Amino acid sequence: MKTTRLLQDTQDDLTIAAQLIRDGELVAFPTETVYGLGADARRENSVRNIFKAKGRPADNPLIVHIAGLDMLNQIASEVPEIAFRLAEAFWPGPLTMVLPKQDCIPSVTSGGLDTVGIRMPSHPAARKLIQLSGCPIAAPSANRSGLPSPTTAKHVMDDMNGRIAAVLDGGQCEVGVESTVICFDTPETIHILRPGLISEEDLRPYARQVYVDQAVFTQIAPEAKAASPGMKYKHYSPKAKILPVDAPDFEAFRDYVLHHQQKNLYCLLFDSDSEIDGIPCLHYGDSGAEQAHDLFFRFRELDELGAELVYVRMPRQTGADLSVYNRLMRAAGFEVIRL
Ligand code: AMP
Ligand code: MG
């Protein structure tokens, strides 16, 4: 067991965190999406320790975080024109681009692939940490593999205390779900591997074609070769069973719930829904942005409350809302009640 230090978003503590990264240690840090579990992306042993601390399958690649475009050229061997246009439009921000990797990124970081996912985060503490460390930082979400991604430093501590050197507390994450991950099938075709706040519609002005991978909507077989390896694992789920209910309106949802009750049942509703008599309910916003912000936070709250089954109001599948839909469906193992 290590002692995990809780650091604050101050110049002194950022200096300590950066020194830990330079020493090859693991430091969890805030980004605008979720908390990341960071190590020097170029150091095999350190990166291997990320997989160990999370219990993450070795073929699930890590995203490498950078603070400036100079770092992009150090870790990507080819950067197409379209990637520069997207970087200009969306970086720093929640967009990850998969590009051919340079040799300085070891295959343990890229999950054995010859490509690497790269992102420039906008959270000031993340940017300062990368700058002070002076290296690209590989960072998956800082949860134990399979659990909901952490959106506060407390969530990280709950999962990682004793396993990593430090957690840098930068408050609650603004976005709340992980970045949009894209690759380029051709120099003018954007392939969305994982939906995030930056939507298909947002990307459309920058390419001739933009499309979303099938794995976002349906469960892919465990033996299938996934364009994005992370998409084949069950993910994001709390201990409670999550069951989305696709109802035409709140009244239909409520009727279903009232006729299908069990012990330790909870509901996760939109803010505009009213309560359901006799059943404890939490709410997770109305818009896609609100729902993204709250979803993982509510999942962890439901576990603390001892929920065993949670009926969830179904988010939309359009725009940024698709990121919420995807996380919810993954948490549910794609099981859904359709009314
Ligand atoms: P996480 O670090 O938990 O946010 O997960 C990162 C996700 O990004 C992985 O699960 C992959 O699905 C995706 N990803 C990262 N690097 C690559 C890559 N080189 N090729 C395809 N997908 C990637
Ligand atoms: Mg993750």
Image (cartoon, rainbow, N blue to C red):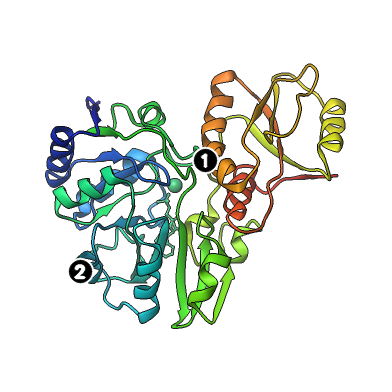
Q: Is residue 74 visible?
A: yes
The first of marks 2 and 1 along the sequence is: 2
- Report the Cα–Cα distance between label 2 and label 1: 33 Å
Write down the residue under mark 2. 74
Which percent across, then down, holds residue 243?
Answer: 70, 38
Name which quarter of the figure residue 42 lies in. bottom left
Taking the image as drawn, is residue 226 in sight?
no
Position of residue 65 measured from the top left corner of the image (x, y, whole percent):
29, 55
Q: Is residue 217 above or below residue 85?
A: above
Q: Give 36 or 226, whichever is nearer the viewer.
A: 36
Residue at 36%, 68% in the rendered image: 87
The residue singled out by tag 1 in the image is: 293
Position of 281 with respect to 130 (left or right) is right
Give the farthest residue toward the top: 278
Position of residue 337 measured from the top left corner of the image (x, y, whole percent): 79, 43
- Amino acid type at mark 1: His
Identify the residue at image location x=46%, y=40%: 149
Could you tell me residue 29's position as x and y percent? Answer: 30, 40
Q: What residue do we see at 37% from left, 48% from top?
A: 140
Image quadrant of residue 31?
Answer: top left
Q: Is residue 148 above or below residue 115?
A: above
**SS class, disc 1:** helix
Front tag of 2 and 1: 1
Say which quarter of the image contains residue 96. Answer: bottom left
